[in-house]
Amino acid sequence: MAYLHKGKRKSETYLSICHNSRDETGQSRREVLYRLGKLSDYAASALQDIGRALYALGGGDVSDFHVEAAQKGMKELGRYNYGFPLVLLSLMRHYKLDVLVRRFEKKHRLSYSLWDVLSLLLCDRWYEPLSKRGSYLTQSDYIGLEKVSLRHLYRGLDILSSYEDAIQLHLYKHNKRLFRYQLDVVFFDVTTIYFDSQVEEEGALRQKGFSKDGKIGKTQVVFALLIDIHKNPIGYELYSGDQYEGHTLIDAIKRLRDKYDIGSVTVVADRGMLNQSNLAAIESHQYHYIIGERLKNLNRSAQDYLLNLGNYQKGTYSDSQGKKKPVYYCTYAYKGRTIIGTYSEKRAKRDKADREERIQKGQKLLKKQEALSKKAARYFLKNQVGQEYVLDKAKVEKHQRYDGFAAIATNNPQIDTLKAIDHYRHLFQIEHVFRTFKSHLDVRPMFHWTDKRIRGHVAICYIAFTLLNYLQQRLKENQCKLSERDIRRVLAKMEVSKVEIEKKPYYITAKKSEKTHAILKILKVKPIPDFILSKNINKVMRWNKPDTT
């Protein structure tokens, strides 16, 4: 077995590679394989390189040396997330929010950075929605964000609340530019956002009203939202919690025209949003609409035509995945608008199953007839003489006529029928948007009391959703469809460990997944190195503040 031998001659140390062997008598003797010469002729780095080269020639892994050296003098100083700051700050600059925020800062001559406030609050909306105090206490979990005081977080909300309209218009214009489209159809709906409070204040936003979350007795605000066919938000408005939702549409339409200077637009909404006065108001603004229509509310002639499959023809529409699906449809002119009837065998089976389930439940309730006075009609029961209830067969037969049929109405005589059907089928997207606001971004319950803080909080959630939706759309275009939860998981795993090796600080990044690389590629952000000196981290990740010149 070969080894390195150090020999002394006079005042010099000589190196040689030797090998031990035994002679014929069995005695051990040293045999010199190669003489390296004087030790003083070699620098330490040269000897290190020779050793590594020999180790590699012998089949060894040179990285073993790094591991061994690191284990001797390495300790972890902390672990931080860089994924949320890196991605969100890139998106914020992509939307030129740095330019917008800088304008706000200059106008108010702020002594603190509103950009830093917004960056932290957006990171927490995406990562793990917290109270503003929670954001303040956990901000050191991120790397690359400047520290923000708690009072500046609250003051930042007040500033943002003053610029709701400017923020919405800014995001809308950039969505049009980034997605390269002309707005021709909008989807409208409202929801309620509740508070963990029952205290009302006269004239304030927080009021008690009909809650869509079933939070009886809680104060709330009404949140009205407009989106386009790509789920991009166009604008929103907050109303007091006791506002009737049907009255919000006209105000939203007026804002759409006044703020965005938009021409011909078709409004798509649920039938509950549009009573006769709302429809008249939309037409007075020269907008078109597509709404759900109740077949049972139409006159007999219209029903007879729309419930006759012989009047239907076959076409196709695009589902939520972009796949072509068959649809049976017909049209009927009715009181100045076009009624579009559709038929689906799948819907017919669902309607039948629902009716049979209600009939079965009604039969069970017949044993408790005293409890049926207010529920009989729902379960296809009718009252006989003496408060006796029996199955209403005539009502069941009438109900069967509508199995599988549905209808929508439009006041646009030029619109293609299949396109109108396709537009209405996209109405489900606004429910998905509300779900994202409420579950993923935790817009409610709210714990703020003043109107300014409430508006500032909703503005943060609105910006967070806009950026999130843009990222999802871009990923989808590149065959990498990720849900909100998927994106959160990917960014949460983008961590760095700060370590000390031989008294020098370094950052070591966690292994990057394919999804991580996909997100960074979409945003044109270079992955940070796996191993980097602490002093170079900000420079490499380009986490400097926006240029204030």
Image (cartoon, grey):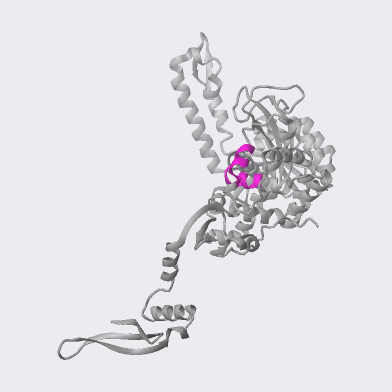
Task: Pinpoint residue 381: horizontal percent, then vertical percent.
Answer: 52, 20
Q: Is residue 131 above or below residue 485?
A: above
Front residue (pair 350, 264): 264
Task: Report the side of 387 relative to 424 (left or right).
Answer: left
Front residue (pair 81, 300): 81
Task: Report the side of 302 relative to 413 (left or right).
Answer: left
Is the magenta region chiefly helix, strand or loop?
helix
- Asked whether residue 186 appears in the rendered view, the answer is yes
Task: Pinpoint residue 387: horizontal percent, then vertical percent.
Answer: 51, 10
- Asked whether residue 291 appears in the rendered view, the answer is no
Question: Which residue is painted at 47% across and 86% down in the image?
Answer: 41
Outermost residue toward the top? 386
Front residue (pair 31, 167): 31
Q: Quadrant of residue 348?
A: top right
Q: Quadrant of residue 134?
A: top right
Tally the numbered discs: 0
Task: Pinpoint residue 309: horizontal percent, then vertical percent.
Answer: 60, 42
Q: Magenta includes 442?
A: no
Which portion, as a residue range, is magenta? 120-139
Outermost residue toward the left? 25
Q: Quadrant of the N terminus?
A: bottom left
Q: Magenta includes 126?
A: yes
Q: Is residue 496 above or below residue 334?
A: below
Question: Which residue is painted at 55% across and 52% down in the image?
Answer: 80
Q: Quadrant of the C terminus?
A: bottom right
Question: Which residue is painted at 59% across and 59% down in the image?
Answer: 519
Task: Report the side of 269 relative to 398 (left or right).
Answer: right
Front residue (pair 245, 367): 245
Task: Pinpoint residue 517: horizontal percent, then vertical percent.
Answer: 56, 62
